[in-house]
Image (spheres, grey):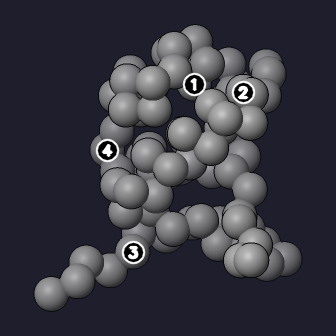
Amino acid sequence: MPITAKITPALCRAARGLLDMNQIELAAAASVSKNTIVDFEKGRRNPTSSNLAAIQRVLEEAGVEFTNGDAPGLRLRKKKR
């Protein structure tokens, strides 16, 4: 089973920036409240595992690839031609 990169508040903010997606758009696409996104990105609380998975899924489906390793990060996937 592949290791799934863990999304952090900073990576969530960075992913939205790469995608030019605001918190309201991400919340709607992930079917969570805007407060869930705001509180997560500010480090106030961690969403439930299902909400966190939904947030990450939306960002990945939009083209973000979360990376593993000593310095976790993200990048935009290359579009298939």
The earlier-in-sequence mark between 4 and 2 is 4
**Disc on the earlier residue, 3 or 1:** 1
Residue that carries the numbered disc 3 in the rendered image = 77
> For the residues carrying marks 4 and 2, which lies nearer the camera in this image?
2
Q: Which residue is mark 2?
A: 47
Closer to the chain start, of discs 4 and 1, is 4
Which type of secondary structure does the marked residue at label 4 adopt?
loop
Q: Nearer the viewer, mark 2 or mark 1?
A: 2
Disc 2/disc 1 C-alpha distance (Å): 8 Å
> In this view, which residue lies farthest toward the right?
70
Residue at the spot 72% in from the left edge and 27% down from the top edge: 47
Q: Which residue is mark 4?
A: 20
Q: Residues within 10 Å of mark 2 (few under 14, many from 20)?
A: some
Measured Cα–Cα span from mark 2 to mark 3: 25 Å
Q: Where does label 1 land, which residue?
A: 37
Answer with left or right where residue 11 lies relative to residue 18: right
Are circles 2 and 3 on residues that touch, CB within 8 Å? Answer: no
